[in-house]
Image (spheres, grey):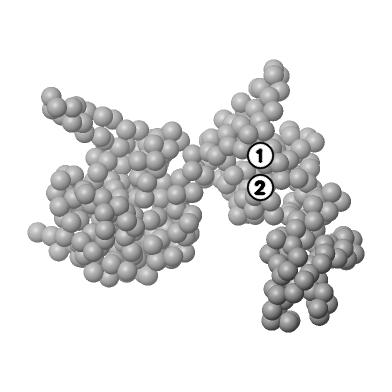
Amino acid sequence: MFKYCDECDKEHLSEELIVPKTVKVQGKEINVELTKLICKECGNEVSDESYMNTQLKKIHDTYVDLYGIPVDEIRNVRIQFKGLGLRPFAKILGIGSASVSRHEAGDLPSDKHVAIYRELQEEPRRIFEYFSNNKHELSPRELKKTEEILNAWQLEQGGKNEQYVEFMQDDEEIIESIYKPFERTQLSGYLPFNLEKFVNMVLYFTNNGGVNKTKLMKLLWYADFLKFKRHTTSMSGAVYTRFPFGPVPKDHEITIAHLKHMDVIDIEETLINDEGWTKMTVRANQEFDPSLFSPAEIGILEEVKSVFRDFGSRRISDYSHEELAWKETREEQPIDYKYAKDLREFDLV
């Protein structure tokens, strides 16, 4: 076959060559036979992406055969505890959630992590020991949900032992997936999305009787953008988009639906006229956790809530339409946090 050779700076006939090689992976040396593509003119290896990918896969598979654990088995370690999300699972095991995510996607775990996965694969009930040791790492909401999941799993062991082989996403992972592509960019306020803070911002604005859903969206936006204006980072790392009635969190309907399913909030729909128009009131179902926020952030939450206390949905929507951020952004497009510098400082009468 003819391939371009970097050394010759032209295409030449190339041939496959099987080369034994010793490589080090996770601190261990493994012997593999790699297939390389060699230029017949100069004898140098030809750079070819498909061959490079094949080599990497061969190294990966060889390591897994010798020391590791296949990806589907890693996934099933968590999935056997039906409904247990990636983040609480990682906290229970004392592994970073980003690491667990990478392991379930195919990255090689360290020896320490392989040992943990193997242990839970062979003795699933050891999860209760990990839970007992690390449950203090869970938020109150995560703790409650995890206790329910583990209790249900324990009861199930007395009956049918079901095998959960399908990879499932829980509510938290679905919400996080909305914002993950934008993390640490100007569209997220230079932060990764922080679900716990976002949830508690919702709880802050919806306690004591609740708030109209349309108004809630604006309160969240003002809190995040005001934080960025004053401190150059957002509060939650959420991304907001321009809608006809003002700024809203990206895919806000999906987010609200999953927060309701998580029992974070409740939504009450009230018919307001004969044409079928309804008022949607969002109410907190859990306690707000102020420990997640800095004093400056608490101050911003209080300020936003106070300024817009007497605003209805229409009035706060109209107010947000006067912001340059809304005027300069196209419909249903993400709103750049750069517009936070032009945010009005609530000079209301």
Q: Which quadrant is the C terminus positioned in?
A: bottom left
Secondary structure, mark 2, is helix
Residue matched to label 2: 104
Determine the residue positioned at 41% across, 39% down: 259
Question: How far across and how far down the image is residue 130, in percent?
Answer: 69, 42
Q: Residues within 10 Å of mark 1 (few under 14, many from 20)?
A: many
Q: Is residue 347 above or below residue 168?
A: below
> Which amino acid, by three-letter code, is at mark 1?
Arg
Q: Residue at x 84, y 62 (%)?
A: 34
Viewer-closest of 41 and 109: 41
Judging from the image, what secondary structure is the residue with disc 1 in?
A: helix
Q: Nearer the viewer, mark 1 or mark 2?
A: 2
Number of marks present in the image shown: 2
Task: Name which residue type carries label 2.
Answer: Glu
Towards the viewer: 28 or 57: 57
Measuring from the top left, give residue 95's x and y in whole percent. 66, 52
Q: Tell me: 140 left or right of 82.
A: left
Residue ID at (75%, 58%): 54
Q: Quadrant of the N terminus?
A: bottom right
Give the residue number, with chain letter if any, for mark 1.
78
From the viewer's perspective, tell me whether residue 186 is left or right of residue 120.
Answer: left
Q: Are marks 1 and 2 in contact (CB under 8 Å)?
A: yes
Which residue is nearer to you in this view: 110 or 21? 21
Quadrant location of residue 342? bottom left
Name which residue lies at 82% across and 67% down. 15
Q: Is residue 327 visible?
A: yes
